[in-house]
Image: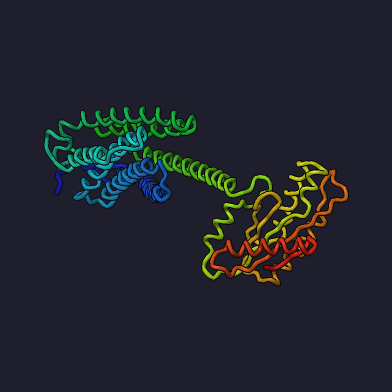
Amino acid sequence: MPNEIVVAGLAGAGVDTWTLWIKIMAVGATATLSALMLVFTVALYRHRDREASVALHFSVANLCATAYVAGDIGVRLCLLENDLRHVMIPYRLSLSAVVMALASLFALHRVLASRIVATRRLGAIYGTGALIAGLFWVDHPLLIIASERYRVTNVGVFADYGTLAAPFYAGCLIALVVVSIGMLRQAFRARGRLLWRMTMFGFAVFFLAGLHDMFRELGLELLPFSGLTLGCAVFQIGAFATMVLHYSHTLRERAHHDHQLRRLEDRVIRDPLSGLFNRAHLEQRLDHLPPGMGGGLLFIDLDHFKGVNDRFGHDHGDQLIRAVADAIRRTVREQDIACRWGGDEFVVYLADADEAAARVVVERLLRAFRHLQLDGTPNLDVGASVGFAALRDEDWRATLQRADQALYQAKAEGRNRLAVG
């Protein structure tokens, strides 16, 4: 059983019920924030986000902060239950969590400076932190904690510190200042004023809380409570807000990138004049049709298109191509594939369509063509010769050749009609 230097009782130990409840709510909040941070981290790794490693070390820092607050709660509960036999366990856990949080901040600083950091270097940082944290569990007058003895004052429990305690706390404070300044610079360069201000505020609170608790641990009591609990909560809220901002920014960037990629892909597979699919895309789609796939191919050729160019000019000819393409797009079904084959020729793949279905589609197309009107082209009469062939050949190119032959048959029979090959 530990040898108490001072036991002032529950009232003298400052274990107020409201303070304890605030701390319990704080540990619940920090645990929740840590869980959310882990969810964000997993999401970033799943999306192969370049900031995933940053989120990982951020999450480790938050878990350490949660462990610190939980250890502080454990000390308070030991005092509340008047069970001081195990009070040093959560006490040592809290101090160890502070060191590991500092190690995770150093690792975070390294990955912010360069996203590609050797695993062994990060392991060395965490290994050094774990080694220093382990000193809290070894009692020796020359180390941080001299013995199992402790003292209870009106603001809490304090260990029987050894020779290394004062320089250790001073070193931790200096290390926090160094890493804070480095991360503030990185935050300002990376994201601008908003993230820089959030980071500056979080580290300022964390630094002041650490400074207060360092003096408190060394016997100089400025406030009747631990400042690091508040500092950890503020740090976690700031870290979570930063992650939310980054993730929302990442989602916006990804949505913009996907939109740009779709536009680029669309440019590659679309005919620039008509807006329909181009010949290469249709050929690729037909090459990948499953064996035995039904349907057929329509081969459409505008009648007397050269006369439109000769009478009204090539600009009106281009307008006619676009108008015909719009009519085809409005007429065919979603599962059909319409393309501009070249010049005034169009090819449409009609999915699951037989000759009867093709006749219905062609009737609607020819009706739509007859009603086309262009500015500056009075008495324009648009017609088309159409050939259809069902997909029953081993190679769709043979089917297209039959449709082409049927198209010439339609022209020979008087144009503006359908022929079946």
Height in image: 299 above or below 54?
below
Considering only vertical position in the picture, is 349 above or below 204? below
* Residue 124 percent across, percent down from the top left: 22, 38
Say which of 294 and 32 sits in front: 294
Residue 369 visible within the image: yes
Residue 188 located left or right of residue 79: right
Image coords of residue 393 (percent x, y): 57, 68
Quadrant of the rendering where the C terminus is positioned: bottom right
State the residue lying farthest toward the right: 379
Is 392 situated left or right of 5 in this image?
A: right
**Residue shown at 54% from the left, 70% from the top:** 292
**Residue 224 in view of the camera:** no
Towards the viewer: 299 or 202: 299
Q: How many marks?
A: 0
Q: Quadrant of residue 383?
A: bottom right
The location of residue 407, given as percent across then percent down, is: 71, 61
Q: Nearer the viewer, residue 43 or 403?
A: 403
Residue 355 figure quarter: bottom right
Q: Is residue 103 above or below residue 415?
A: above
Query: What x and y, as percent, mark residue 74?
Result: 28, 49
In the displayed structure image, the side of residue 221 where residue 388 appears, left or right: right
Look at 41% across and 40% down and name the residue there: 239
